[in-house]
Image (cartoon, helix red, strand yellow):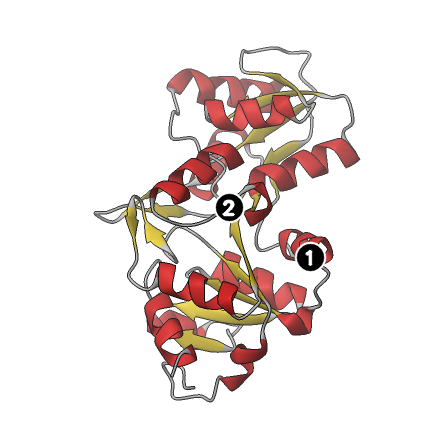
Amino acid sequence: MLDYNHKNADELKQKSLWLFDMDGTIYEENRLFDGTLALLDFITKRGGRYVFLTNNSSRSVEDYIKKVTAMGIQADRESFFTSSQATVRYLKEQLPGALVYCQGTGSLVKELRDSGIRVTTEMDLTAEAVVIGFDTELSFQKLRNTCELLTKKDIPYIATNPDFVCPTDYGFVPDCGSMAIGIRYATGKMPLVIGKPEPTMIEIAERKFGKTPADTVLIGDRLYTDIASGVNAGVTTIAVLSGEAKYEEIMSYEKQPDYVFQSVKEIFEELSR
């Protein structure tokens, strides 16, 4: 099989753990890309496993299960690993018992609380850390609370993900990374970033399913998160042209993907030849 650059990609036929980004890779907002269901079915029938890795912290895992099953994708809790879950892991390991102010959606707040994290969404100067996520419910008051806490206190400041934009059906909207830049101009502070490009989510998925980097391939549309995380984890990477990254950007990026495909549909078509 050949990729977009006519590079031999036959090694993909031997992969058994397929890690997919979501926004811009398998769907765009609420529109499932052609070929997604066919590729996932192909992987399963060959004895492989697919897992969705997403930096989008605006939804909980339960929300994602509802979203993708409505699109016809077979999925359960084992099918996902999100930046929200990675953030929970970090908070439990590094800040056990801390009161966290969260600038995020109700879904993110609920996921943190359900995981045993002490969370406040109100201005509280006893807060011991600040967490921001991709907040589709953002208000001025939330931003004010974040900035006041970071200005008045020297406490850990964490972002669930570094993505600058999130794709929509008409273009893009600012994501968590862009929000962090705005907060930097107000407070002079930048967060510790969780999620891709850190290799954490990939490594956890490999351990969970008993796979090695040689078994694993990651597919995504963003260079500085998806592809970088795959390179950092030492797994095979595929960049698709269905989302944020453009071909010229991919070819000049410092961390080159192993393969480039137009879309998941093209991956399926090449695999099934």
Give the residue at mark 1.
209
Residue 168 appears left or right of 126: left
Residue 110 appears left or right of 38: right
- Report crowding for label 2: few under 14, some 14 to 19, many 20 or more residues within 10 A (C-alpha): many
Pointers 1 and 2 in contact (C-beta within 8 Å): no
Residue type, numbered disc 1: Phe
Give the residue at mark 2.
55
Number of marks drawn: 2
Rendered view: 153 above or below 92: above
Please tell me whether mark 2 sits on a helix, a strand or a loop.
loop
Q: Tell me where residue 68 appears, x and y as whole percent.
A: 40, 44
Rendered view: 248 above or below 152: below
Rendered view: 23 above or below 270: above
Of marks 1 and 2, the one in the foreground: 1
Q: Tell me where residue 14 appears, x and y as whole percent.
A: 58, 78
Residue 8 appears left or right of 6: right
Q: Tell me where residue 220 appears, x and y as whole percent.
A: 45, 61
